[in-house]
Image (cartoon, rainbow, N blue to C red):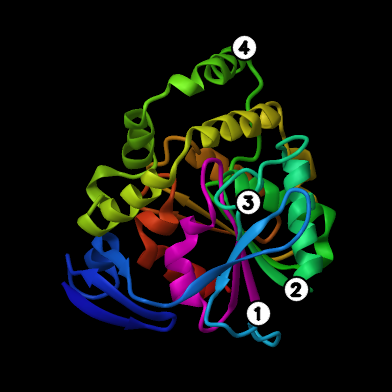
Amino acid sequence: MGYLKVKGGKYFYREQGAGLRGAGLRGAGLRRASLPVGYSQKTGRPAVTYLHPGDGQTPSQERKTLLMIHGLGGSSRDFDFQFRYFSRKYRCIAPDLAGCGRSSLAEDNYSLESSVSQIKRLFRQLKLKSVILLGHSMGGMIALEYGLKYPRDIDKLILVSCLPFVKNNLTYLLGLRIFQYIYPLIPKSAIRFYLFRLNISPQNLNEDLSKWLKTELNQFQKKDLKVMSEYVNSLVGWNILGRLKGIKVPTLIIKGEKDFIVSNKSLEILHQKIKGSKESLIKGCRHCPMYEKPLAFNQILEEFI
């Protein structure tokens, strides 16, 4: 175990190769050192909670803002490693979508449209301008919808493991309906398999990442599965291909090479449809590169922003 000082603070790392590039970058696992972060909650329906630098000081208005939107079944904590790397240089904010993390349950529905409205409310309350907007998986879909609806709010766009459309076929719909009925019976072992095997490549599952995932698993509740099913239901048939030409800001598309959920073809489609976009494929990585390979992910992010 070594000690690594980086721009965003201090990290511990397990060395599995020389240097930050090459084998060391591909295999390193991060365990965050103490850099205080905190939650704030703004009034509203639903009440959206967001993660921010928690040193008791108001983030500098002069710094660029990096706003990160989590994906299905996730929370603001999905960006722990990015917070501690970038928050010294950028104003980092990560909301918990309605029904996720510490945010309250939605009163009406869970959808991309309602999520865009929640993000807009956060923009207004925090007086955000020219934001670097990052979205992971479903969060990427929300980021795309937001960027098209409020283009003046966005300076740069980062899409991580994001689909450009969701299939609308009988098999998919049947699977969704079954899930909506049986989710109360789903054991934590199945959720563990999802977190530890589908989202993460076993070769990257080191001791530090395992501890972090176990913490996330312990916070997972049955109501989270219900919320997930309702979000998924709202995504069926969603397709943004015909509107991607409306994205005019600099855009970076990141994807794990071994992602089971988002194909490499999806990355290419997004890259081709969004004029001037850049793409980055992280080798040996699955659906959640921001915590599966945080060093590689943060370096790619830093070079872009």
Do the residues under discs 3 and 1 have CB atoms within 8 angstroms? no
Q: Amino acid at mark 1?
A: Lys
* Badge 1 or badge 4: first in the primary sequence: 1
Q: Amino acid at mark 4?
A: Leu
Q: Amino acid at mark 3?
A: Ser
Horizontal and vertical percent position of residue 45: 78, 49
Alpha carbon distance from label 4 to label 2: 41 Å
Q: Which residue is depicted at the point 17% across and 65% down?
A: 16
* Badge 1 or badge 2: first in the primary sequence: 1
* Badge 3 or badge 2: first in the primary sequence: 3
Specify the label residue 170 is tagged with: 4
Horizontal and vertical percent position of residue 28: 25, 64
* Badge 3 or badge 1: first in the primary sequence: 1
Horizontal and vertical percent position of residue 153: 79, 67
Alpha carbon distance from label 3 to label 1: 25 Å
* Residue count near mark 1 (Cα–Cα under 10 Å), binned few <14, some 14–19, many ≥20: some
- Element under disc 2: loop
Q: Quadrant of residue 2?
A: bottom left
Q: Is residue 248 visible from the viewing direction of this image?
A: no
Specify the label residue 130 is tagged with: 2
Do the residues under discs 4 and 2 have CB atoms within 8 angstroms? no
Report the front residue among 137 and 59: 59
- Element under disc 1: loop
Residue wearing tag 3: 103
Alpha carbon distance from label 1 to label 4: 45 Å
Magenta residues span 65-94
- Element under disc 4: helix
Left/right placement of residue 176 relative to residue 23 reads right
Q: Is residue 231 visible from the viewing direction of this image?
A: yes
Do the residues under discs 1 and 2 have CB atoms within 8 angstroms? yes
